[in-house]
Amino acid sequence: SAAWSWPYATVVSWTGIRGVVTLAAAFVLPVETPQRPVLVLAALVVVGGTLLVQGLTLPVLVRRVHLPGPDAARDALQEAALLSRAARAGIARLEELRADGDDPDVIGRLERGATNRANAAWERFGRGSQSGETPSEAYRRLRLEMLRAEKAVVLDARDTGSADDDVLREVLKVLDTEESTLDRLVDRSLEADREVASSGMGEALCSHLDESPQAMRPRTPDGCESCLEQGTRWVHLRLCLTCGRVGCCDSSPEHHADRHYDETGHPVMRSFEPGESWRWCYPDQLLG
């Protein structure tokens, strides 16, 4: 793995664990140890000194070495990119394992599950959905209502005594687990009031991203070129940085951005959503 840069190494060294280790070492000394009270006092002085000196100067040090603060948008962007690569790897492995006797419905469910998980991460970005609600948001809203109805039936069975206690606990555990997962996705919805960019993602850029421009004049600034022609709808928009064609994202019904890449091989697209400047390389599956 890559070594830390010197600003990170400096801050980690400055905040190293001293108090617990020092006090533990002092208090485990046998009672008959010569000058034990002096050693314990020295340990307390070290602990107090480091807490005061390092603790009070840590904010100044972080500012001096220009360490970036927490960035929810950058983390979410990296998470979405990683989930996309993982989903593609999983689907590729599924194709390797697929046999003639496998149920096509099962294969389809597996592919949709991997794809929808990655798409939901990308849907946290963008403000251009025509419906005002992304597919993953609609799924969460409707599924939560379904779960409430399902739990009402289970609780009624508990109240009437029509099901064994062990069965009730197992069924409620299944429903509660799914509900908590959906609630977690809602809680992690992204609220970004500044530009969402891919700088500082910790990955080396590929040759396609190096050679690609940062911006391109869109051919259809009002929306997805094909959706406007066909009268279909989109969720979020993507801009080809080779020819300027605007296409719709993977969560959109027609997937015109991906289709454009499949047809032309143009390697890099950029988000065409307000406040977003991140780019994506199709061949290398990298942000830039």
Image (tube, rainbow, N blue to C red):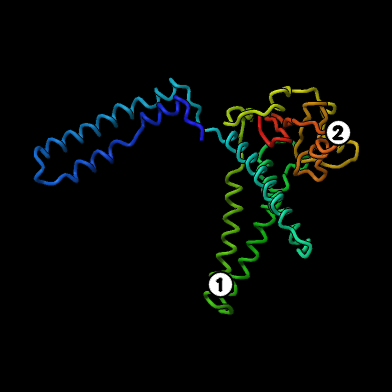
For this view, does 286 lie left or right of residue 223?
Answer: left
x, y percent for residue 229:
90, 36
Going by the image, does 199 lie left or right of 232?
left
State the residue at coordinates (20%, 35%). 43
Q: Nearer the viewer, residue 150 or 99?
A: 99
- Indicate left or right for 256 with 47 as reference: right
Q: Which residue is mark 2?
A: 225
Crowd band around label 1 with a 10 angstrom C-alpha radius: few (<14), some (14–19), many (20+): some
Residue 111 screen position, x and y as percent:
73, 53
- What's the residue type where badge 1 is placed? Leu
Residue depicted at x 59% and y 52%: 183
Q: Amino acid at mark 2?
A: Glu
Looking at the image, the residue that sits furthest to the right is 229
Q: Is residue 32 left or right of residue 112?
A: left
User: Dot 2 lies on which element?
Assistant: helix
Q: Quadrant of residue 262?
A: top right
Tell me the SS state at disc 1: helix
Residue occupying image coordinates x 79% and y 30%:
240
Q: Is residue 140 above or below residue 79?
A: below
Q: Residues within 10 Å of mark 2 (few under 14, many from 20)?
A: some
Residue 64 lies, in percent from the top left, at: 43, 20
Q: Is 13 located above or below residue 168 in the figure? A: above
Point out which mark residue 168 bears: 1
